[in-house]
Image (spheres, rainbow, N blue to C red):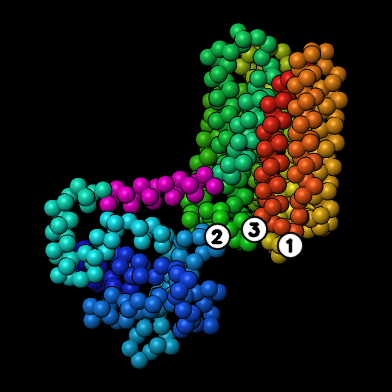
């Protein structure tokens, strides 16, 4: 009963913020006519055709719902409620509300609760039913909480930029295997040393990509509107909280490990990752193509290979530092790959980057040239890798590295032939394919001996 009064009050004062009674009536449908649309409303806005519950009830001021489906999240609708005050239609009060039309419309329990709040008498009957069916009411509440939690978890997954996280996991795992000489090296201490390095690097990775999203909210609204900060799924305060928490966690793990090479890797990635994104005098290196590429190259190609190898060989296995052929190969090969990732990632972003003064190579030279440069660098690297593989004295390793690199080069060449650089969706999918080649390389590196 308390809820009913509160709900009625809300519906009088702020229509649309009561229970879901208004929302379900405004599902986006192709049949909804485009009428009564204000001049300044977003394109595709449709008027909710049903009479408002206030009108049905004959109480409270009338409202008009105007909704439009979001392009970045199909199925999710932005609704603007116009409170039509008597005799003052021109000065309508507006309230914007976001919700998932599909989930609102399909939950039978929500429907029951909506009916509860629609009509007072029905509500009394319905609510006493709900009260009696205590289990059903709890499930309803639980369902809403779990939907909200899974939405936030999905947003957090996007916030971490999963393609970079996989790159860090696969890269550090592969490099950690390089100093191993025999099966006896796989001890609990070694596993602990590996997990410490991985956890610290992953936290630093989340710090770096999270910080970038905090400083890029406006650019991402154009280039990557699905990212949680740009889409408004996370507030700036949540973003700051996550970034600071993961930074503290990364350094805490690093300090606790007592490993000098690991701490060195964390401090340098922290400095470069911060300088890359932070908007301050002499910083925001992502504005300059060469500086931006150097940051990514230094961390992905030099630090990941050398510092994590040194961490495992010197700090964990307690052996003198000695480079191996696979380590040298990995560092040189990843220089090419990281440069390609740094250049290619900006190809689909030219519009937003140009508007915000980011002088990426794609903005300067045009996407087609950068694309051709990237493919040439990768094919040359694969050719060199095949030659290095062929020089191996071990037959099995020779077969794996030559055929592996040959196959990857062929797949790249096949896909590259059909790419239309003007098609943003295809370029983005090709960029993700480059990351897959990057992961695959880490499976081949331990065989280069
Ligand atoms: C291995 C360790 C310790 C950490 C990994 C940490 C990372 C991600 C290192 C990469 C080095 C670095 C300085 C990266 C900055 C790159 C970055 C945040 C790129 C995002 O650039 P944008 O051009 O904004 O790309 P999006 O448009 O994809 O957001
Ligand atoms: O991790 C990296 O090597 C570079 C990078 C690429 C990208 O598409 C988004 C974030 C990011 O840090």
Is 39 contained in the magenta span? no
Q: Main secondary structure of the magenta part?
A: helix
State the CA–CA distance, disc 2 to disc 1. 21 Å
Question: Residue 447, percent across and down?
Answer: 73, 20
Q: Please name the residue that numbered disc 2 is placed on.
A: 72
Q: Quadrant of residue 374?
A: top right
Q: Quadrant of residue 54?
A: bottom left
State the CA–CA distance, disc 3 to disc 1. 11 Å
Could you tell me if residue 266 is visible in this image? no
Q: For residue 223, which numbered disc appears in the image?
A: 3
Q: Nearer the viewer, residue 46 or 274?
A: 46
Which is more foreground, mark 3 or mark 1?
3
Query: Ligand 1 within 8 A of label 1's CB?
Result: no
Q: Residue at 51% x, 59% y: name it.
A: 73
Quadrant where the image shows the C terminus: top right
What segment is highlighted magenta in the picture? 140-159
């Amino acid at each position: 009963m308390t809820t009913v009064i509160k709900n009625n009050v809300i519906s009088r004062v702020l229509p649309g913020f009561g229970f879901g009674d208004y929302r379900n009536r405004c599902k986006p449908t192709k049949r909804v006519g485009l009428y009564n649309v204000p001049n300044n409303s977003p394109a595709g806005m449709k008027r909710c055709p049903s009479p408002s519950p206030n009108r049905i009830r004959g109480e409270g001021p009338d409202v008009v719902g105007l909704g439009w489906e979001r392009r970045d999240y199909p199925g999710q609708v932005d609704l603007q409620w116009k409170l039509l005050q008597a005799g003052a239609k021109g000065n309508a009060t507006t309230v914007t509300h976001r919700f998932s039309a599909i989930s609102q419309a399909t939950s039978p329990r929500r429907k029951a609760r909506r009916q509860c709040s629609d009509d007072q008498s029905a509500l009394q009957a319905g609510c006493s039913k709900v009260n009696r069916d205590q289990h059903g009411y709890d499930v309803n509440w639980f369902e809403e909480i779990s939907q909200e939690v899974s939405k936030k978890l999905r947003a957090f997954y996007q916030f971490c930029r999963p393609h970079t996280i996989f790159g860090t996991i696969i890269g550090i795992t592969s490099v950690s295997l390089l100093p191993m000489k025999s099966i006896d090296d796989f001890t609990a201490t070694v596993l602990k040393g590996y997990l410490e390095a991985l956890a610290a690097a992953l936290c630093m990775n989340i710090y770096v990509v999270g910080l970038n999203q905090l400083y890029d909210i406006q650019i991402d609204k154009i280039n990557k509107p699905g990212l949680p900060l740009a889409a408004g799924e996370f507030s700036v305060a949540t973003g700051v909280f996550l970034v600071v928490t993961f930074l503290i966690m990364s350094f805490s793990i690093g300090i606790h490990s007592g490993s000098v090479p690991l701490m060195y890797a964390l401090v340098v990635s922290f400095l470069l990752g911060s300088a890359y994104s932070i908007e301050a005098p002499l910083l925001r290196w992502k504005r300059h193509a060469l500086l931006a590429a150097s940051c990514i190259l230094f961390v992905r190609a030099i630090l990941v290979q050398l510092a994590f190898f040194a961490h495992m060989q010197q700090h964990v296995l307690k052996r003198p530092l000695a480079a191996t052929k696979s380590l040298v190969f990995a560092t040189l090969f990843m220089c090419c790959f990281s440069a390609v990732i740094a250049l290619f990632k900006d190809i689909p972003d030219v519009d937003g980057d140009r508007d915000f003064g980011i002088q990426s190579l794609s903005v300067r030279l045009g996407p087609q040239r950068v694309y051709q440069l990237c493919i040439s660098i990768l094919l040359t690297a694969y050719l060199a890798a095949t030659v290095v593989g062929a020089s191996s004295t071990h037959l099995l390793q020779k077969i794996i590295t030559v055929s592996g690199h040959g196959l990857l080069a062929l797949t790249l060449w096949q896909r590259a032939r059909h790419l239309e650089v003007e098609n943003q969706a295809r370029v983005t999918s090709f960029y993700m394919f480059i990351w897959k080649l990057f992961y695959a390389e880490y499976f081949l590196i331990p065989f280069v001996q």
